[in-house]
Image (tube, rainbow, N blue to C red):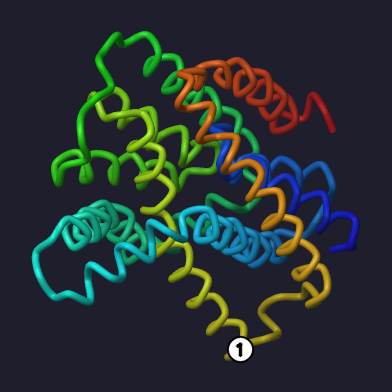
Amino acid sequence: MELIEALLLGILQGLTEYLPVSSSGHLQLGAAMLGTESSDNLLFSVIVHAATALSSVVIFRKEILDIIRGLLKFTWNAETQYAAMIVVSMIPVGIIGVFFKDEVKALFDGNITLVGAMLFVTAALLFFSWLVKVNHDQEITFGRALIIGIAQAIAVLPGVSRSGATISTALMIKTDRVKAARFSFLMVIPPIMGEALLDTKDLIEDPSKYSIDALPLLVGFIAAFVTGLMACKAMLSIVNQGKLHYFGFYCMVVGTIALLVGTGVIG
């Protein structure tokens, strides 16, 4: 992978991780159009996802510190309850990761047609969350956390936006907009960081498994982190203003392009 490719893909990841347009789908489509090797794609994807997870930590550092302080009190307080709901939300994606890891990884092997189809699924979720007229004023509960977690598990498919799926689902079950966005961004930090650590362990044990050099990974990481900070702040504003569905049109356009690339009409 060339440095310019790493820079472009890192920027792409940082922007699309938080905006509801599927970062994994864009990385797959971008990698296909740039001609990067599939063996490089998975490791690079993990690295830049870790970068954007880190940008979440920076944006929500106060909330995270409050949760940690609450946990250290060793009582069933509001912070402990919130942390427990994040754990509950991780159960569905954890099951996918444990029992279907190889099958999920196989989906990230240049299946651009799948990406295109799933981008249309993302568009449908965004439109539906807008069409369902509800009062978005409810708190996060354990039941809602599990439902949102199921949406996150479905979003392992390249082309299904994680933020789009989780926030849209939260809105459809009447969750307050701001609380939905905050929970969506906080709940993804543990699984992404855990996956990054596991892949780092694999890389240390078998460096020959990946052919990508360290410098492109560093460039991609920095690019994804910086743009992730900007996109996260923008997304919080977009959700609060109720403009999430506007991205449905964008997903339809990119989904169409992906289908054309996947079927050989383009490229």
Mark 1: give few (<14), some (14-19) or many (20+) Cα within 10 Å.
few
Q: Is residue 78 left or right of residue 21?
A: left
Which of the 4 image quarters holds residue 231?
Answer: top right
Left or right for 77, reference 201: left
Seen at 61% across and 89% down, the residue is 204
Nearer-the-camera pick, 177 or 24? 177
**Vertical order, 233 against 43 (above or below):** above
Residue 234 in the image: state x and y as whole percent: 60, 35
In what element is the residue under mark 1? helix
**Quick check: 61 above or below 247?**
below
Query: Which residue is depicted at the point 58% across and 57% down?
Result: 55
* Residue sitting at x 24%, y 24%: 137
Q: Nearer the viewer, residue 54 or 117?
A: 54
Percent across and percent down for residue 87 are 24, 60
Query: x, y (%) of residue 36?
Result: 80, 56
Residue 125: x and y in percent read: 41, 23
Depth check, front residue: 143 or 75: 75
Q: What residue do we see at 67% from left, 20% from top? A: 256
How many badges with numbers are in the image? 1
173 to 182, vertically: above or below: above
Residue that label 1 marks: 204
Q: Quadrant of the N terminus?
A: bottom right
Residue 202 lies in what quarter of the image?
Answer: bottom right
Query: In the rendered view, does 32 fall on the left or right side of 134?
Result: right
Is residue 28 or residue 20 the one in the foreground?
A: 20
**Which amino acid type is shown beneath numbered disc 1?**
Ile
Dividing the picture into quarters, in which one does residue 218 lie? bottom right
As drawn, the residue found furthest toward the left would be: 76
Quarter occupied by the C terminus: top right
